[in-house]
Amino acid sequence: MSQWIDVSVRLRNGLLPWPGDAPFALNRVSDLARGDVCTLSTVSMSAHAGTHVDAPLHFVKGGRSVDTMRLDATIGPARVIAIRNPRVITTEEIRPHRIRAGERLLFKTRNGAGREPGHFFESYVAVAPDAAKYLAARRVRAVGIDGPSIAPPDHDMAETHRILLRAGIWIIEWLDLRRVPAGRYDLVCLPLRIVDGDGAPARALLRRPARR
């Protein structure tokens, strides 16, 4: 049986958030090292810190919240697709992969090369609106990416999100796919069950499926 590979970003103090978002902060309220009876911490962060799932509510008025996500949206067979375009994910590049309805797709781009996981940077590769429309038409189940957002950091950001989320496609952002070759995997990615949440941090794991 193949081993699970953790493809989620480590949440830690100093992790740079999306500009304007609250940073991740772990604060020791008590500590055995200081002679306290136990070690106890508080955590504060954006709901979109590190590896996380976007719910429709994030960009769609009246959309579903993250606690209503069906478990099979982000648990099950998935496909990692390597993207060559250094700027954007286009329909032309993903069409040859013969994407089918119900698939879970994870895009591996240049985002992970030579960069610290979870470190924010502006010139990341994302899904163009035309590619988002193609994925919506193919009726995929979930789309993930190894950058801080599924959408380009410009006027197309809201459009790409809305196209996917209105189509019922759940989004996984800020994956760490550096150690994962393109191919087919089993995926487990579970966001925190935050009531009325527009998104939630998640732990994401991949493994090669067992041979039959």
Image: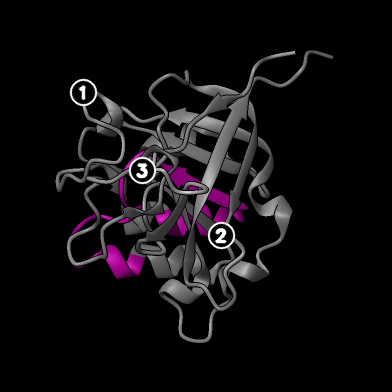
Describe the element under mark 2 as helix, strand or loop.
loop
The answer to whether mark 1 and mark 3 are in CB contact below 8 A is no
Instruction: Write the residue at 55% across / 58% down.
Output: 170
Q: Earlier in the sequence, mark 2 or mark 3?
A: 3
Discs 2/3, front:
3
* Image x and y of residue 183, in percent: 56, 22
Quarter of the picture holding the C terminus: top right
Describe the element under mark 1 as helix, strand or loop.
loop
The image's colouring method is one colour
Camera-side residue of 130 and 149: 149
In the shown orientation, is residue 124 left or right of residue 163?
Answer: left
* Image x and y of residue 125, in percent: 26, 42
* Image x and y of residue 124, in percent: 22, 43
Stretch of the chain drawn in magenta? 132-159
The answer to whether mark 2 and mark 3 are in CB contact below 8 A is no
Instruction: Write the residue at 44% across / 48% down.
Output: 36
Q: How many marks?
A: 3
Say what amino acid the circle numbered 1 marks: Gly
Residue placed under numbered mark 2 in the picture? 169
Instruction: Write the residue at 68% across / 14% down.
Output: 2
Q: Earlier in the sequence, mark 1 or mark 2?
A: 1
Q: Is residue 143 magenta?
A: yes
Q: Residues within 10 Å of mark 2 (few under 14, many from 20)?
A: many
Residue placed under numbered mark 1 in the picture? 114
Q: Is residue 74 above or below residue 54?
A: above
Say what amino acid the circle numbered 2 marks: Ile
Say what amino acid the circle numbered 3 marks: Arg
Residue placed under numbered mark 3 in the picture? 34
Q: Earlier in the sequence, mark 1 or mark 3?
A: 3
In the shown orientation, is residue 130 left or right of residue 142?
Answer: left
